[in-house]
Image: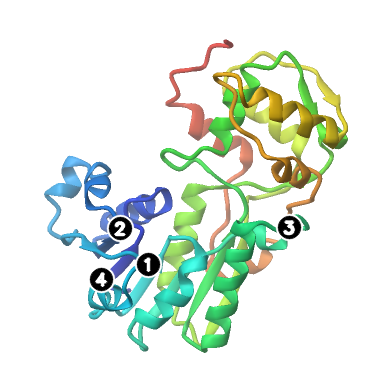
């Protein structure tokens, strides 16, 4: 078991979860963050007094490489929860012998590439070509993290709609993964002695249609059941351009709507066999997410 782990992005959603999980296991954490004040806001009283949590080291993956190299100079295991596009900078700054555990995204598989997906591909390519020991984990849509805006944004939208318009009737497959399973996968990857670079997709227990996903979110959020209607993607794109100007409606871009037509399911057998992590079901995860939500009433 690794005693000390450097966590890049320790003030972000996945970074906070990993930081707390490591401390709960009695491991020392070296937080590497871009914004010290924002990081301080994420600390609990228990963390502030925990001697295993070292003082944050301020470094920007997009900044001077020597600053990042200084922050990582004593690292043996590095978890990078920052966007995968920054992996080339990490490889340049990290000690050659340090094992790396990075977060990517299954967005890399999309037929509608964007800056996010292209950045993931860039980071993965850099890691695989580096020959360095470590892994890049590609989660599907993450939900359940403190401050996440995937499921919560969807629930906020559903509260405003009398019907649920879905392209293709919502027949495409999705396989969201709870933050707890992302965290467990990262911890398992930390404890594995990787030989060379690896890449692995991680996902929820079973795929569901997007229609069922939306209905499960609505139920978990305490909303009344709404009818699902099939709407052409082009009409949804036009409608979203108008609705996002209204207060209370989340912004949904054209590519997001197009990606609703893609299957986003992955085989989790490699995840289970490699990391020993069996993800929770979507129903259990959503119940866990909304159990502390005060906004259960149908608005």
Task: Give x and y (percent) for residue 217.
Answer: 63, 29
**Distance CA(mark 1)–CA(mark 2):** 8 Å
Q: Which one is in front in this view, the residue at disc 3 or the one at disc 4?
A: 3
Please identify the quarter of the rendering in which residue 32 is found.
bottom left
Pointer 1: what residue?
61
Earlier residue among tags 1 and 4: 4
The residue depicted at 83 percent of the width and 36 percent of the height is 233
**Mark 3 = which residue?**
110
**Element at badge 2?**
loop
Residue linked to disc 2: 34
Task: Please rate how many residues cluster around mark 4, counting C-alpha atoms within 10 Å: few if below 14, some from 14 to 19, many from 20.
Answer: many
Separation of residues labelled 2 and 3 (CA atoms): 29 Å
Front one among 101 and 233: 233
| Disc 2 to disc 3: CB gap under 8 Å | no
Q: Residue at x 33, y 76 (%)?
A: 65
Q: Are marks 1 and 2 in contact (CB under 8 Å)?
A: yes
181 or 116: nearer the eye? 116
Q: Is residue 154 left or right of residue 76?
A: right
Crowd rating for badge 3 (residues with CA inside 10 Å; few <14, some 14–19, many 20+): some
In this view, the residue in front, 289 or 238, is 238
- Image quadrant where one finds the C terminus: top right
What residue appears at the point 19 percent right and 58 percent down from the top-left corner? Answer: 53
The answer to whether residue 13 is above or below residue 89 is above
């Amino acid at each position: 078991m690794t005693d000390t782990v450097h966590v890049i992005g320790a003030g972000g959603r996945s970074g906070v979860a990993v930081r707390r999980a490591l401390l709960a296991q009695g491991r020392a954490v070296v937080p590497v963050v871009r914004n010290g004040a924002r990081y301080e806001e994420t600390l609990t009283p228990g963390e502030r007094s925990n001697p295993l949590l070292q003082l944050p080291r301020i470094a920007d993956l997009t900044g001077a490489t020597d600053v990042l190299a200084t922050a990582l100079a004593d690292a043996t295991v590095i978890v990078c929860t920052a966007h995968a596009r920054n992996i080339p900078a990490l490889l340049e700054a990290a000690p050659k012998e340090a094992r790396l555990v990075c977060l990517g995204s299954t967005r890399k598989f999309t037929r509608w590439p964007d800056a996010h997906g292209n950045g993931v591909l860039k980071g993965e390519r850099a890691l695989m070509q580096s020959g360095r020991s470590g892994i890049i984990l590609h989660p599907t849509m993450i939900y359940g993290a403190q401050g996440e805006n995937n499921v919560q944004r969807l629930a906020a939208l559903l509260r405003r709609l009398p019907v649920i318009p879905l392209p293709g009737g919502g027949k495409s497959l999705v396989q969201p993964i709870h933050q707890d399973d992302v965290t467990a996968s990262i911890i398992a990857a930390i404890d594995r002695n990787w030989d060379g670079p690896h890449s692995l997709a991680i996902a929820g227990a079973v795929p569901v249609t997007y229609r069922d996903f939306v209905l499960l979110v609505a139920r978990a959020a305490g909303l009344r059941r709404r009818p699902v209607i099939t709407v052409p993607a082009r009409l949804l794109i036009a409608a979203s351009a108008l609705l996002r100007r209204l207060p209370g409606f989340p912004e949904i871009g054209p590519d997001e709507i197009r990606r609703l037509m893609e299957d986003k399911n992955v085989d989790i057998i490699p995840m289970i066999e490699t990391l020993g992590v069996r993800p929770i079901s979507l129903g259990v995860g959503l119940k866990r997410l909304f159990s502390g939500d005060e906004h259960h009433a149908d608005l």
